């Protein structure tokens, strides 16, 4: 901690980055680990002449073997040290990726300092899921070290459009010829959805055009280019007015309509998060694949009584003009949840709103336990794990489905008196499917392979499915919470990890008749090491042409100790 960094934010961020580079073994960084006086140290080079920082390491145990030591005397570490190290160890072919990642680091630090200057301040009427989404935005991503960075956002943009500040704003609109649109789902639109005249366009357009919502940041620049690229510049009409007040969720590009918490609108954004290559626009095919998987999962849920704890956001209504910046998803949250709290898993380790105001505890999960679980946080965690593994083991073993339902896409639906939280899942376009098993389970109701716009959603490999199950369901939705709760002193780590192992083992026993259960048992419970994602390597530092990653979100270049053994 220095006078230039009074909160220590830069060192904390730099440590997160070095931990990640070490975990992903970028540029063979693990070969620079040595034993000094009986303890491991990382000799982090800071120039080509051989100078280095000697960083004491300690056991990690979660996704990596070692991490920078958290206790004892602090070794000064800055983002400039990180830049110098990357410049020294990286392959020249990674020069652009290194420069982009250094910029990410600086943007993340600026975003953290902006939060310190502008603490969370809910407006009147902002309650429920929206508050939990904002609280989730204050928790660092368990794997990606610079998750606070949003490429292309300046400080004013963050204050106006980032979920951690609970902003409200109105959407922009563009009228697109109806015959140039692909639409699907329910034809009715929510209250407040504008007509052409409401946003300053001629009423006559209503007979030939449809309005598409546009994020203000997209309207600022990318929209005009998109219309030109789509051949619509002369036919489309940019609305001079705005309409429909919304507030962003954790994803930033998905927003909750003011006064209508069941209605969410997802629109493309000209930004990247969790990696330079992880862009926040969406190709039209992702809308179609997401809607298709929603229909598949809905059909399964209606007939499979073992999935009674599964709730699905309705992702079946969308429109697009065959361009990555010209489209939207109109998501509907299931009805009948008014007496429940909907809390994204990413929010569970955040300080609750009362704690944000007072600077103390409790955590959101402690608040929920007080409200609905008699104050017993381990019991609530255990009940959540039962729901988590019952759902995902069933989908894996019976249907050949591995969901990319990470902490942002999975929410607890909880209320007093329930025996276990239900799970609300959304965003289905990243699902991985073993087509033969799905076809065997559904028969003629199974979608043909040709029905999927993105062939990467299909695999013949149960090992590929297991990689998704481990890195998403086990690591992010279970393991990260266990380690986080232990770090915060809520319960001992062995107790929490025992719950994870036991609940997964229970679910596998209930599916022992399905051969795929043996795959999960071997890959998770009995394995010496577990795979992990190399998100910084694939997402920013190294070009896809060099990593060979067909999907940067499914690039497994690392492994760590099996913390469930």
Image (spheres, helix red, strand yellow):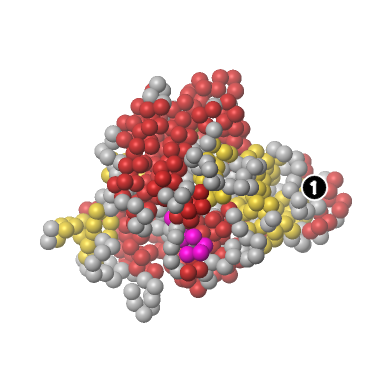
Q: Is residue 61 magenta?
A: no
Instruction: Identify the image quadrant of residue 82.
Output: bottom left
Q: Is residue 174 left or right of residue 103?
A: right
Q: Quadrant of the N terminus?
A: bottom left
Q: What residue is drawn where x is 47% and y is 48%?
A: 373
Q: What residue is drawn where x is 68% and y is 57%?
A: 258
Foreground of the two, 112 or 361: 361
Q: Is residue 174 left or right of residue 50?
A: right
Q: What residue is drawn where x is 40% and y is 21%?
A: 513
Q: Secondary structure at mark 1?
A: strand
Residue 163: give x, y in percent of width and height: 56, 60
Q: Is residue 351 magenta?
A: yes
Q: Quadrant of the C terminus?
A: top left
Instruction: Identify the image quadrant of residue 146.
Output: bottom left
Q: Is residue 205 left or right of residue 356?
A: right
Q: How many marks can you see?
A: 1
Q: Extreme right residue here?
A: 204
Give the magenta range: 349-355
| Above or below: residue 2 compared with residue 217 | below
Instruction: Identify the image quadrant of residue 187.
Output: top right
Foreground of the two, 503 or 102: 503
Residue 35: give x, y in percent of width and height: 15, 57
Name the residue that disc number 1 marks. Answer: 209
Q: What residue is drawn where x is 14% and y is 61%?
A: 36
| Above or below: residue 59 compared with residue 472 | below
Residue 208: give x, y in percent of width and height: 82, 45
Residue 57: give x, y in percent of width and height: 23, 59
């Amino acid at each position: 901690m220095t006078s230039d960094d009074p909160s220590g934010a830069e060192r904390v961020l730099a440590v997160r980055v070095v931990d990640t580079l070490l975990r992903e073994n970028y540029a063979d960084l693990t070969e620079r680990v040595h034993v000094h006086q009986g303890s491991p140290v990382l000799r982090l080079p800071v120039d080509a002449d051989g100078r280095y920082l000697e960083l004491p390491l300690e056991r990690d145990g979660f996704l990596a073997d070692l991490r920078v030591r958290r206790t004892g005397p602090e070794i000064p570490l800055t983002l400039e040290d990180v830049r110098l190290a990357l410049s020294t160890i990286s392959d020249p072919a990674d020069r652009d990726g290194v420069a982009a990642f250094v910029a990410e680091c600086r943007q993340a630090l600026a975003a953290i300092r902006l939060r310190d200057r502008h603490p969370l301040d809910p407006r009147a009427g902002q309650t429920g899921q929206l508050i939990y989404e904002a609280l989730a935005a204050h928790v660092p991503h368990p794997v990606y070290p610079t998750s606070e960075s949003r490429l292309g956002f300046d400080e004013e943009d963050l204050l106006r459009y980032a979920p951690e500040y609970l902003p409200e704003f109105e959407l922009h609109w563009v009228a697109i010829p109806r015959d140039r649109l692909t639409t699907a789902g329910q034809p009715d639109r929510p209250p407040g959805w504008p007509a052409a005249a409401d946003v300053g366009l001629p009423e006559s357009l209503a007979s030939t055009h449809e309005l598409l919502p546009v994020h203000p940041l997209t309207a600022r620049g990318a929209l005009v280019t998109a219309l030109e690229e789509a051949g619509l510049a002369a036919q489309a009409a940019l609305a001079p007015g705005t309409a429909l007040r919304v507030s962003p969720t954790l994803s930033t590009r998905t927003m909750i309509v003011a006064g209508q918490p069941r209605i969410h609108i997802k629109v493309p954004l000209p930004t990247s998060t969790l990696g330079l290559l992880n862009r926040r626009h969406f190709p039209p095919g992702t809308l179609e694949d997401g809607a298709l998987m929603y229909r598949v999962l809905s059909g399964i849920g209606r007939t499979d009584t073992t999935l009674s704890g599964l709730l699905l956001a309705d992702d079946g209504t969308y429109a697009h003009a065959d361009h990555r910046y010209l489209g939207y998803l109109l998501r509907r949250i299931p009805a009948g949840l008014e007496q429940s709290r909907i809390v994204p898993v990413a929010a569970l380790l955040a300080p609750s709103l009362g704690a944000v105001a007072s600077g103390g505890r409790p955590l959101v999960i402690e608040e929920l336990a007080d409200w609905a679980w008699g104050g017993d946080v381990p019991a609530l965690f255990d009940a959540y794990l039962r729901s988590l593994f019952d759902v995902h083991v069933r989908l894996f073993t019976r249907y050949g489905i591995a969901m990319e339902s990470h902490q942002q896409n999975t929410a607890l639906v909880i209320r007093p008196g329930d025996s276990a939280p239900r799970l609300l899942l959304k965003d289905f376009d990243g699902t991985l499917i073993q087509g033969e098993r799905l076809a065997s389970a559904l028969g003629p109701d199974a979608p043909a392979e040709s029905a999927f716009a993105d062939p990467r959603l299909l695999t013949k490999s149960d090992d590929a499915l297991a990689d998704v199950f481990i890195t998403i369901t086990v690591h992010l939705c279970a393991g990260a919470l266990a380690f986080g709760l232990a770090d915060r002193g809520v319960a001992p780590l062995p107790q929490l990890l025992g719950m994870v192992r036991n609940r997964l083992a229970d679910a596998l026993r209930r599916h022992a008749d399905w051969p795929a259960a043996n795959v999960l048992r071997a890959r998770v419970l009995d394995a010496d090491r577990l795979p992990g994602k190399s998100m910084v390597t694939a997402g920013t530092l190294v070009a896809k042409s060099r990593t060979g990653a067909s999907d940067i979100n499914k690039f497994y270049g690392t492994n760590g100790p099996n913390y469930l053994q």
